[in-house]
Image: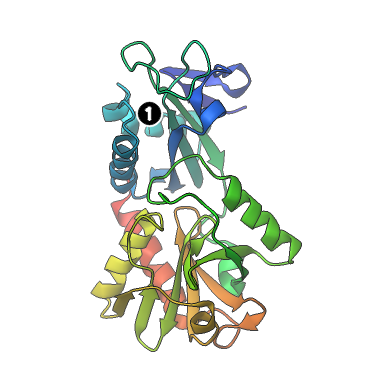
Amino acid sequence: MRTVYVNGEYLPENEAKVSIFDRGFLMADGVYEVTSVLDGKLIDFAGHAKRLERSLSELDMPHPEVLPDLLEVHRELVRLNGIEEGMIYLQITRGAPDDRDFVFPDPETTTPTVVLFTQNKPGLANSPAAQKGIKVISIEDQRWARRDIKTVQLLFPSMGKMMAKAAGVDDAWMVEDGAVTEGTSNNAYIIKGNTIITRHLGNEILHGITRAAVLRFAKEAQMQVEERSFTIAEAQKADEAFITSASTFVMPVVEVDGVAVGTGTPGPVAARLREIYLDESRKAAV
């Protein structure tokens, strides 16, 4: 049985409780982060912690007292649950006032709710999917306008995952005004020649921590990076395509809307980027 963290306490998962009045439950008034664990160490923790603080600030959400100690909390959960490869999920909500109300509760009387739990994922770095690549479909992006804030409003991405499943593929890329925004839980890329193309940062996409690291490594490897919108038609004509996220690292995409990308198999650039990312991230892990 897992040990989880709830508001300052380490508890068996079956003893963990959150109020029915918690605004994360009632209003999706919460933010989250997912940090991968490799070799028992945290990957890109500093980036996740920085983005978490930004998400809290963008929603005018009080910063919980535990915020400066989150690294120690993550490490303790890794230790208590014996995680060698896996993930740690962290969620902070605006807290649980005495009753349901659209108006934000008084931060002087309602403290944030902080929850963390681990997910054990042996073989995370050696995923079979990375060897064969994944297939995606395109769907209309129907999310709210502030996707740069990592909130727990994940209903439409979940619906997108189900659309992909119903279509017999692995995931979906969301499209707005004719251009790809991102995947349901990842950033999207195509490769043409020696150029990696991915959507520019803005309110339309999540500012991926893995995205930032991969693009930095790509530039260090003398690859060209172009941050701009691209279409599904461009993706279908690309040499390669891939996604990035904290849990998939760099994952090749071999088919878009039924059309093979490149040779229809994982290409050398995505494979190399995955190798570089895993090597460098392990070196810098905490």
Q: Nearer the viewer, residue 19 or 80?
A: 19
Q: Nearer the viewer, residue 250 or 154?
A: 154
Q: Is residue 96 above or below residue 204?
A: above
Across and down, in percent, residue 195 comes to: 35, 83
Q: Is residue 246 above or below residue 263?
A: above
Across and down, in percent, residue 283 comes to: 31, 56
Using the rendered image of the protein, determine whether residue 18 is visible from the camera's viewpoint: yes
**Numbered disc total:** 1
Quarter of the figure with residue 279: bottom left
Q: Is residue 25 above or below residue 247?
A: above
Q: Could you tell me which residue is drawn at 57 percent across and 61 percent down?
A: 127
Quarter of the figure with residue 119: top right
Q: Could you tell me which residue is drawn at 58 percent across and 72 percent down?
A: 131
Q: Which residue is mark 1?
A: 73
Q: Residues within 10 Å of mark 1 (few under 14, many from 20)?
A: some
Q: Quadrant of the N terminus?
A: top right
Using the rendered image of the protein, determine whether residue 84 is visible from the camera's viewpoint: no
Q: Is residue 88 above or below residue 108?
A: below
**Horizontal side of residue 179 vs 156, given as left or right:** left
